[in-house]
Image (cartoon, grey):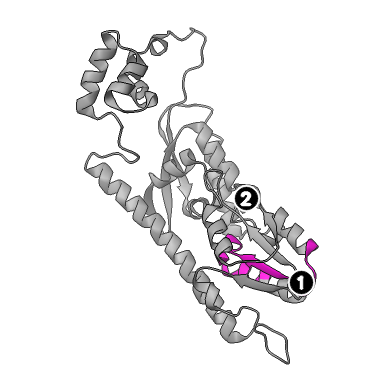
Amino acid sequence: MANLVYKRVSTDQQSTDRQNLVLAEAGIEDPVVFEEQAGTSSRLHPLQRPKFGELLTYARPGDTVHISEMFRLVRGTGHILDVLDVLHRDRLALRIHDGAFSAMDLTARHPRTGELLSTVKFKVQTLAAAGELQRDLQRELTYDGLRAAEAKGNKGGRRPAVTAAKAIAVRAAYLGGQSIAALARNHRVSRGAIRTAVADLMPEHATVAPEDAPAPELPVVLDMPGKVADFLRAADLEPAERAVLDQGVSVRRGQGYTLLVSAVPAVHRQLLDRCQPLDNAAAIPAQRKARREYANRVSTLGDLRPEHHS
């Protein structure tokens, strides 16, 4: 009987270090590892992910599938039940080594009907809904914290290694002829931190752009339908895409809402590409309509003046 280990991370910036630790502590014998390519979306149904598909093809009745925690494999309740049905069909055991699901026997089925026990299904649905609620609350709290900080004049992100008070001396010394390397040694910071502090004083910053160089894109505010915004908030986005979405302003519209998103046209087009699944036949009509509305607004961005397109 083989031990099949499944691992996945949502973005290229994440690592499997924590999963490796949990699985190593579990003492799995002779593991056969199936690891998704970094950045494989959690919105993609597990049964459609390449490496999980390879795992199911490789598996034989009696094998055990090991994961560090349930949400490495699935997110929504429907996905969980789909996967449990397939594992039952292929007579595979599932072992979760961390998190709320680790204490549950997810393979318990009715002795006569063979269906998942109603008590197990209820626990699965409840824990999955609680997980989704936790992620939504974390996003809301992060958004509220950033807005509160902005109201006080603070910006998010790391504090600069060269403080404002120290930057005056650094800039004066740089203008006096000290090198980047010497300033970094004297102030015990990286050369990159010094370059950031004197970026506008460096020779390349003063280079005049060619007359025929294209003008930089300016931010444009578009009304993003709430159904589109809800879909994107749960998607795996690039940092720039996530930032403009988090900084959007919600405006109540009837029973729903719209999100005022300020971004350069290129980012609007990227967000439109991200919500392509809403235009599929599987999407509900209201979602398809919402995406078409957003697509129509994005299509007007040939004129790049920073005005509000509603």
Q: Is residue 255 visible?
A: no
Which of pointers 2 and 1 lies earlier in the amino acid sequence?
1
Q: Position of residue 273 (x, y in %)?
A: 60, 42
Tell me: 239 left or right of 176.
right
Task: From the image, tell me which residue sits under label 2.
Answer: 40
Instruction: Judge whether residue 291 is colored magenta.
Output: no
Helix, strand or loop at mark 2? loop
Magenta region = 58-83
Tell me: 245 left or right of 157.
right
Q: Residue at x 39, y 58 (%)?
A: 138
Q: Residue at x 35, y 24 (%)?
A: 196
Q: Residue at x 28, y 22 (%)?
A: 186
Q: Position of residue 43 (x, y in %)?
A: 59, 56
Farthest left residue in view? 165
Tell me: 187 left or right of 63.
left
Front position in the image: 294 or 74: 74
Instruction: Say if 301 sits above or below 200 in the image.
Output: below
Instruction: Say if 132 sits above or below 41 in the image.
Output: below
Tell me: 58 left or right of 145.
right
> In which image quadrant can residue 81 be found?
bottom right
